[in-house]
Image (cartoon, rainbow, N blue to C red):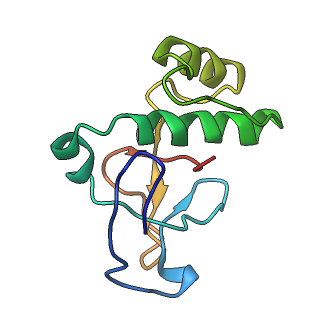
């Protein structure tokens, strides 16, 4: 897998959808990224992209963010506010295997 921000990775495990974590409203999570990959590669753009995608999905909006002239972090936060989503882009997930809430909020979003 590769993203538009130069990040790359491998598919380490494929599991049944019912075993994947999901949002409290039942929305399944498709992909889980290693959280160490973002700070070690200084690749914050992928976080902002996923948060903006999540806001857009809630608002029914599609965004175009040109390279080197895209949304500023403050603009992403504004869209999250409009969508009534947490400004951190984090939310609590439910463990698909146990049905229990994960201990810490997790950054989620949609790649746009």
44 with respect to 14 (left or right): left
Quadrant showing the N terminus = bottom left
Query: Seen in the image, is 59 located left or right of residue 77?
Result: right
Q: How many numbered markers are drawn?
A: 0
Compared with 82, 62 (above or below) is below
Q: Is 99 in front, or is 96?
A: 96
Residue that appears at 74% across and 42% down:
57
User: Is residue 3 shown above or below 107?
Assistant: below
Percent across and percent down for residue 79 are: 65, 21
Q: Position of residue 78 (x, y in %)?
A: 61, 14
Q: Quadrant of residue 69?
A: top right
Where does residue 18 sit, x and y in percent of width and height? 56, 81
Identify the residue at the far left of this view. 40
Residue in the image at 48% along x and 81% along y? 19
Q: Residue at position x 59%, y 49% from top?
A: 110
Q: Residue at x 31, y 46 (%)?
A: 104
Q: Is residue 29 above or below residue 58?
A: below
Return the x and y of residue 103 as percentages of the image width and height: 31, 52
């Amino acid at each position: 897998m590769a993203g538009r921000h130069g990040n790359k990775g491998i598919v380490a495990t494929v599991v049944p959808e019912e075993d994947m974590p999901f949002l409290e409203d039942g929305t399944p999570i498709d992909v889980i990224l290693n959280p160490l990959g973002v700070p070690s590669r200084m690749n914050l753009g992928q976080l902002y992209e996923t948060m903006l995608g999540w806001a857009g999905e809630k608002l029914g909006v599609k965004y175009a963010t040109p390279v080197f002239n895209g949304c500023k972090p403050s603009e992403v936060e504004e869209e999250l506010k409009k969508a009534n989503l947490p400004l951190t882009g984090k939310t609590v997930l439910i463990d698909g295997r146990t049905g229990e809430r994960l201990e810490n909020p997790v950054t989620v979003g949609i790649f746009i």
